[in-house]
Amino acid sequence: MQNPYLPKRLDLLSSQEELDSKPALISSDESSCVYHALDTRYKVPEVACLFTFQSPLIENHTSSQVLCDLYQHAFLEQLAPSLSLAANAGLSVSFYQEDLELKLSLYGYHDKAPLLLAEIFETFHQVAPSKEQFDLYCNTLAVEYDNASKELPVRQAMQQLDSVLFNKPTALDKLTAIRSISYEEFMKFSKSLFERTYTEAFLYGNLKREDAQSLWKSLKTSLASTPFPREDHTPRKILVLNQNNGPRKLVQSTDRQGAGALLLLQEGPFSFENKAIQQVLGYALSDAF
Protein backbone atom coordinates (compact mmCIF):
# COMPACT_ATOMS: atom_id res chain seq x y z
CA MET A 1 0.00 0.00 0.00
CA GLN A 2 1.40 3.37 -1.03
CA ASN A 3 1.59 5.99 1.68
CA PRO A 4 -0.59 8.94 0.51
CA TYR A 5 1.18 11.35 2.87
CA LEU A 6 4.70 10.94 1.46
CA PRO A 7 5.75 14.41 0.24
CA LYS A 8 6.47 14.89 -3.44
CA ARG A 9 7.43 18.56 -3.25
CA LEU A 10 10.04 19.88 -0.85
CA ASP A 11 10.70 23.23 -2.51
CA LEU A 12 10.99 26.40 -0.45
CA LEU A 13 9.12 29.61 -1.24
CA SER A 14 11.17 32.17 -3.15
CA SER A 15 13.07 34.94 -1.39
CA GLN A 16 10.74 37.53 -2.92
CA GLU A 17 7.73 35.93 -1.25
CA GLU A 18 9.58 35.83 2.07
CA LEU A 19 9.40 39.63 2.28
CA ASP A 20 5.77 39.38 3.42
CA SER A 21 6.46 37.37 6.58
CA LYS A 22 4.61 39.22 9.36
CA PRO A 23 1.64 37.42 10.95
CA ALA A 24 -1.58 38.45 9.24
CA LEU A 25 -5.23 37.93 10.10
CA ILE A 26 -6.73 35.95 7.21
CA SER A 27 -10.18 35.22 8.67
CA SER A 28 -12.24 36.80 11.42
CA ASP A 29 -15.96 36.38 12.05
CA GLU A 30 -18.38 35.03 14.65
CA SER A 31 -17.09 31.49 14.15
CA SER A 32 -13.32 31.87 13.70
CA CYS A 33 -10.14 33.89 14.04
CA VAL A 34 -7.25 32.65 11.89
CA TYR A 35 -3.70 34.00 11.49
CA HIS A 36 -0.99 33.11 9.00
CA ALA A 37 2.75 33.75 8.99
CA LEU A 38 5.44 32.74 6.51
CA ASP A 39 8.58 31.10 7.87
CA THR A 40 11.64 33.23 7.12
CA ARG A 41 13.85 31.97 9.95
CA TYR A 42 14.17 28.20 9.71
CA LYS A 43 13.61 27.93 5.94
CA VAL A 44 12.55 24.30 5.84
CA PRO A 45 9.73 22.75 3.76
CA GLU A 46 7.49 22.32 6.80
CA VAL A 47 4.41 23.84 8.41
CA ALA A 48 3.00 24.11 11.91
CA CYS A 49 -0.79 24.36 12.16
CA LEU A 50 -2.41 25.03 15.52
CA PHE A 51 -6.18 24.94 16.07
CA THR A 52 -8.28 25.60 19.17
CA PHE A 53 -11.97 24.67 19.23
CA GLN A 54 -14.55 25.89 21.72
CA SER A 55 -18.02 24.39 21.95
CA PRO A 56 -20.95 24.99 24.33
CA LEU A 57 -20.79 21.26 25.16
CA ILE A 58 -17.30 21.59 26.68
CA GLU A 59 -17.99 22.57 30.26
CA ASN A 60 -16.23 22.30 33.60
CA HIS A 61 -18.55 19.74 35.17
CA THR A 62 -17.33 16.18 35.49
CA SER A 63 -19.58 14.43 32.96
CA SER A 64 -18.67 16.92 30.19
CA GLN A 65 -14.96 16.46 30.90
CA VAL A 66 -15.27 12.67 30.79
CA LEU A 67 -17.30 12.80 27.56
CA CYS A 68 -14.54 14.97 26.04
CA ASP A 69 -11.93 12.43 27.12
CA LEU A 70 -13.98 9.64 25.53
CA TYR A 71 -14.41 11.65 22.32
CA GLN A 72 -10.68 12.34 22.15
CA HIS A 73 -9.91 8.64 22.63
CA ALA A 74 -12.44 7.50 20.03
CA PHE A 75 -11.34 10.19 17.54
CA LEU A 76 -7.67 9.20 17.72
CA GLU A 77 -8.53 5.50 17.49
CA GLN A 78 -10.65 6.10 14.39
CA LEU A 79 -7.85 8.06 12.73
CA ALA A 80 -5.07 5.76 13.93
CA PRO A 81 -4.33 4.12 10.52
CA SER A 82 -4.01 7.50 8.78
CA LEU A 83 -2.05 9.07 11.62
CA SER A 84 0.38 6.14 11.57
CA LEU A 85 0.99 6.54 7.84
CA ALA A 86 1.33 10.30 8.26
CA ALA A 87 3.88 9.87 11.08
CA ASN A 88 5.96 7.61 8.83
CA ALA A 89 5.85 10.37 6.21
CA GLY A 90 6.99 13.12 8.56
CA LEU A 91 3.65 14.54 9.75
CA SER A 92 2.84 14.46 13.47
CA VAL A 93 -0.55 15.25 14.99
CA SER A 94 -1.69 15.79 18.57
CA PHE A 95 -5.27 16.24 19.79
CA TYR A 96 -6.09 17.00 23.41
CA GLN A 97 -8.34 18.89 25.81
CA GLU A 98 -7.18 21.85 27.88
CA ASP A 99 -8.96 24.71 29.68
CA LEU A 100 -12.44 24.06 28.20
CA GLU A 101 -10.98 23.79 24.70
CA LEU A 102 -10.07 21.04 22.26
CA LYS A 103 -6.67 21.61 20.70
CA LEU A 104 -5.25 20.19 17.50
CA SER A 105 -1.68 20.61 16.28
CA LEU A 106 0.00 19.38 13.12
CA TYR A 107 3.72 19.60 12.35
CA GLY A 108 5.68 18.34 9.38
CA TYR A 109 6.26 18.55 5.64
CA HIS A 110 4.01 21.10 3.97
CA ASP A 111 3.19 19.15 0.80
CA LYS A 112 0.60 16.71 2.19
CA ALA A 113 -0.41 18.63 5.32
CA PRO A 114 -3.63 19.93 3.66
CA LEU A 115 -4.60 16.36 2.73
CA LEU A 116 -4.23 15.15 6.32
CA LEU A 117 -6.02 18.20 7.74
CA ALA A 118 -8.94 17.63 5.36
CA GLU A 119 -9.33 14.05 6.63
CA ILE A 120 -9.09 15.18 10.25
CA PHE A 121 -11.76 17.86 9.86
CA GLU A 122 -14.09 15.47 8.04
CA THR A 123 -13.69 12.96 10.89
CA PHE A 124 -14.83 15.45 13.55
CA HIS A 125 -18.48 14.71 12.64
CA GLN A 126 -17.94 10.98 12.06
CA VAL A 127 -16.79 9.68 15.44
CA ALA A 128 -19.16 6.76 15.97
CA PRO A 129 -17.58 3.76 17.72
CA SER A 130 -19.50 0.54 18.17
CA LYS A 131 -20.93 -0.38 21.56
CA GLU A 132 -18.06 -2.84 22.06
CA GLN A 133 -15.48 -0.18 21.23
CA PHE A 134 -17.19 2.30 23.55
CA ASP A 135 -17.04 -0.20 26.44
CA LEU A 136 -13.35 -0.76 25.71
CA TYR A 137 -12.62 2.99 25.72
CA CYS A 138 -14.50 3.40 29.00
CA ASN A 139 -12.49 0.60 30.61
CA THR A 140 -9.21 2.07 29.31
CA LEU A 141 -10.01 5.54 30.65
CA ALA A 142 -11.21 4.11 33.95
CA VAL A 143 -7.81 2.46 34.40
CA GLU A 144 -6.06 5.75 33.53
CA TYR A 145 -8.19 7.67 36.05
CA ASP A 146 -7.59 5.02 38.70
CA ASN A 147 -3.82 5.09 38.09
CA ALA A 148 -3.80 8.90 38.28
CA SER A 149 -5.50 8.73 41.66
CA LYS A 150 -2.60 6.58 42.88
CA GLU A 151 0.16 8.99 41.87
CA LEU A 152 2.81 10.16 44.31
CA PRO A 153 1.28 12.15 47.19
CA VAL A 154 2.68 15.46 45.93
CA ARG A 155 1.11 14.88 42.51
CA GLN A 156 -2.21 14.05 44.14
CA ALA A 157 -1.90 17.30 46.08
CA MET A 158 -1.37 19.20 42.82
CA GLN A 159 -4.49 17.58 41.34
CA GLN A 160 -6.51 18.55 44.40
CA LEU A 161 -5.21 22.12 44.30
CA ASP A 162 -6.18 22.43 40.62
CA SER A 163 -9.64 21.14 41.48
CA VAL A 164 -10.09 23.75 44.21
CA LEU A 165 -8.65 26.72 42.30
CA PHE A 166 -10.19 26.10 38.90
CA ASN A 167 -13.22 23.98 39.83
CA LYS A 168 -11.84 21.08 37.80
CA PRO A 169 -12.81 17.44 38.43
CA THR A 170 -10.13 15.20 39.90
CA ALA A 171 -9.20 11.77 38.57
CA LEU A 172 -11.37 10.18 41.26
CA ASP A 173 -14.32 12.36 40.22
CA LYS A 174 -13.87 11.22 36.62
CA LEU A 175 -13.55 7.58 37.68
CA THR A 176 -16.93 7.81 39.41
CA ALA A 177 -18.58 9.65 36.49
CA ILE A 178 -17.40 7.33 33.70
CA ARG A 179 -19.22 4.39 35.29
CA SER A 180 -22.57 6.11 34.76
CA ILE A 181 -22.12 7.40 31.17
CA SER A 182 -24.13 5.43 28.64
CA TYR A 183 -23.34 4.64 25.01
CA GLU A 184 -26.39 6.65 23.89
CA GLU A 185 -25.25 9.66 25.91
CA PHE A 186 -21.82 9.55 24.29
CA MET A 187 -23.21 9.19 20.76
CA LYS A 188 -25.43 12.23 21.29
CA PHE A 189 -22.45 14.20 22.59
CA SER A 190 -20.22 13.11 19.69
CA LYS A 191 -22.83 14.07 17.11
CA SER A 192 -23.40 17.53 18.61
CA LEU A 193 -19.90 18.51 19.75
CA PHE A 194 -18.88 20.28 16.53
CA GLU A 195 -22.32 21.52 15.50
CA ARG A 196 -21.60 24.91 17.07
CA THR A 197 -18.01 26.04 17.48
CA TYR A 198 -15.57 28.90 17.63
CA THR A 199 -12.16 28.21 16.07
CA GLU A 200 -8.86 29.97 16.62
CA ALA A 201 -5.95 28.97 14.40
CA PHE A 202 -2.40 29.86 13.44
CA LEU A 203 -0.93 28.56 10.18
CA TYR A 204 2.85 28.97 10.03
CA GLY A 205 5.64 27.79 7.79
CA ASN A 206 6.35 27.13 4.15
CA LEU A 207 2.88 28.24 3.05
CA LYS A 208 1.82 31.21 0.93
CA ARG A 209 -0.84 33.51 2.32
CA GLU A 210 -3.28 32.79 -0.49
CA ASP A 211 -2.74 29.05 0.02
CA ALA A 212 -3.40 29.47 3.75
CA GLN A 213 -6.62 31.33 2.99
CA SER A 214 -7.70 28.62 0.56
CA LEU A 215 -6.83 25.90 3.09
CA TRP A 216 -8.86 27.51 5.86
CA LYS A 217 -11.82 28.09 3.54
CA SER A 218 -11.82 24.38 2.68
CA LEU A 219 -11.42 23.29 6.32
CA LYS A 220 -14.19 25.63 7.46
CA THR A 221 -16.52 24.09 4.87
CA SER A 222 -15.68 20.60 6.15
CA LEU A 223 -16.23 21.68 9.75
CA ALA A 224 -19.72 22.89 8.83
CA SER A 225 -20.39 24.45 12.22
CA THR A 226 -22.71 27.25 13.17
CA PRO A 227 -21.04 30.16 15.01
CA PHE A 228 -20.39 30.06 18.75
CA PRO A 229 -19.55 33.76 19.26
CA ARG A 230 -17.15 34.96 21.94
CA GLU A 231 -19.84 36.61 24.03
CA ASP A 232 -21.44 33.18 24.58
CA HIS A 233 -18.24 31.55 25.85
CA THR A 234 -17.97 30.42 29.45
CA PRO A 235 -15.13 32.42 31.02
CA ARG A 236 -12.46 30.54 32.89
CA LYS A 237 -12.86 31.07 36.62
CA ILE A 238 -10.32 30.97 39.42
CA LEU A 239 -10.88 30.96 43.16
CA VAL A 240 -9.88 34.21 44.88
CA LEU A 241 -9.39 33.77 48.60
CA ASN A 242 -10.72 36.21 51.17
CA GLN A 243 -7.66 37.98 52.56
CA ASN A 244 -9.35 38.60 55.92
CA ASN A 245 -9.43 34.90 56.80
CA GLY A 246 -6.29 32.85 56.51
CA PRO A 247 -4.02 31.10 56.14
CA ARG A 248 -5.97 28.02 55.12
CA LYS A 249 -4.98 24.37 55.18
CA LEU A 250 -6.46 21.54 53.13
CA VAL A 251 -5.69 17.98 54.17
CA GLN A 252 -6.31 14.93 51.99
CA SER A 253 -5.58 11.34 52.97
CA THR A 254 -4.00 8.88 50.53
CA ASP A 255 -3.22 5.18 50.44
CA ARG A 256 0.22 5.87 48.99
CA GLN A 257 3.24 5.88 51.27
CA GLY A 258 4.86 9.22 51.98
CA ALA A 259 3.47 12.73 52.10
CA GLY A 260 3.32 15.84 49.95
CA ALA A 261 2.97 19.50 50.84
CA LEU A 262 2.17 22.48 48.61
CA LEU A 263 2.32 26.17 49.46
CA LEU A 264 0.02 28.53 47.56
CA LEU A 265 0.47 32.30 47.80
CA GLN A 266 -2.17 34.69 46.50
CA GLU A 267 -0.33 37.72 45.14
CA GLY A 268 -3.20 39.84 43.86
CA PRO A 269 -2.78 41.92 40.68
CA PHE A 270 0.36 41.22 38.66
CA SER A 271 3.41 43.42 39.07
CA PHE A 272 7.06 42.86 38.26
CA GLU A 273 7.92 43.43 41.92
CA ASN A 274 5.52 40.67 43.04
CA LYS A 275 6.86 38.38 40.34
CA ALA A 276 10.44 38.97 41.49
CA ILE A 277 9.50 38.29 45.11
CA GLN A 278 7.78 35.05 44.06
CA GLN A 279 10.87 33.88 42.16
CA VAL A 280 13.24 34.69 45.04
CA LEU A 281 10.97 32.87 47.50
CA GLY A 282 10.76 29.92 45.11
CA TYR A 283 14.55 29.61 44.98
CA ALA A 284 14.74 29.85 48.78
CA LEU A 285 12.18 27.09 49.27
CA SER A 286 13.84 24.95 46.62
CA ASP A 287 17.18 25.15 48.44
CA ALA A 288 15.52 24.38 51.77
CA PHE A 289 14.11 21.12 50.45
Image (tube, rainbow, N blue to C red):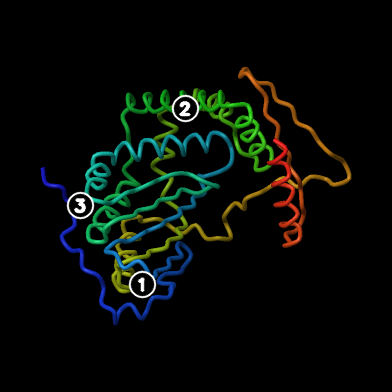
Q: Residue furthest front?
A: 287
Give the quadrant of the N terminus: top left
| Residue 57 relative to residue 195: left or right | right
Q: Is residue 156 left or right of residue 179?
A: right
Q: Which residue is mark 2?
A: 144
* Helix, strand or loop for disc 3: loop
Rendered image quadrant of residue 39: bottom left
Does 278 sit left or right of 140 as displayed?
right
User: Where residue 152 sits: x, y (%)?
Assistant: 59, 26
Q: Residue 5 shows which numbered tag?
A: 3
Image: 259 above or below 30: above
79 left or right of 149 in image: left
The residue shown at (15%, 47%) is 3
Q: Nearer the viewer, mark 2 or mark 1?
A: 1
Q: Which mark is residue 215?
A: none
Residue 210, image x, y percentages: 30, 74
Q: CA distance from mark 2 to mark 1?
A: 42 Å
Q: Say which of 36 and 68 sits in front.
A: 36
